[in-house]
Amino acid sequence: MFKVFFLMFLLVPLVELYVLIEVGSVIGALPTILLTIFTAIVGAGLMKNQGVATLQRAQQSLAMGRAPETEMMEGMFIFLGGLFLLIPGFITDTFGLLFLIPPIRQFLARKFILQRQSNYARQHGRDGNVYETEWTESENGHVKQVHVTYHSSQSDVIEGEVLDSEESPKKNDK
């Protein structure tokens, strides 16, 4: 993991510098610098507007009793998009703009969430099976009825029911 970050911190600035020099040789140094500053300003504005909208959607989700996981992931991509737009360079600006386009950002957020859920299920031995149990107790605490339903990830459903036919012991009055 450290090697990947090291390579990114080494390669990304070098590639960005190369692209800036090439673009500067085609359109000139001043337009290249102004274009870089312009993308940073536009990125900051987009980040602010889309961040506020995503925050409002997250608050609505919470008000409805739903976890705002998609909105949280979108917020992360908005932050990264803004950060990439603030870094001078055309390649990072391209990634930054992609992260700030709502359909692309929503797709990436959903994909990331599904991947995390899949990894969590694999790490914790979750196989997609669901066990449901119901029971009814009598007045003295004895279980009178048990109902178990098993749903597997292969869509098999197995149901079972146990009924207690014995009556609870009665006190002998003498």
Image (tube, rainbow, N blue to C red):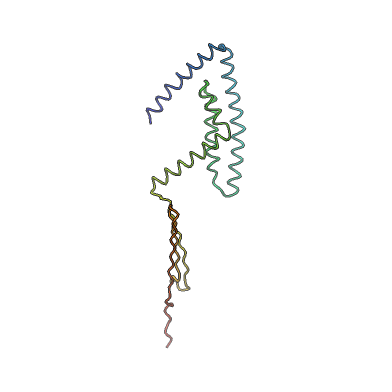
Is 159 above or below relative to 80?
below
- Name the image quarter holding the N terminus: top left
Q: Quadrant of residue 105?
A: top right
Q: Nearer the viewer, residue 15 or 168?
A: 15
Q: Quadrant of residue 52?
A: top right
Q: How many marks?
A: 0
Horizontal side, residue 30 vs residue 8: left or right: right
- Residue occupying image coordinates x 43% and y 65%: 160
Position of residue 155 measured from the top left corner of the image (x, y, whole percent):
45, 54
Q: Nearer the viewer, residue 161 or 2?
A: 161
Position of residue 30 measured from the top left corner of the image (x, y, whole percent):
58, 12
Q: Quadrant of residue 162?
A: bottom left
- Residue occupying image coordinates x 60% and y 34%: 50
- Name the image quarter holding the C terminus: bottom left
Position of residue 57 measured from the top left corner of the image (x, y, whole percent):
60, 41
Position of residue 51 measured from the top left corner of the image (x, y, whole percent):
59, 34
- Residue occupying image coordinates x 52% and y 38%: 109
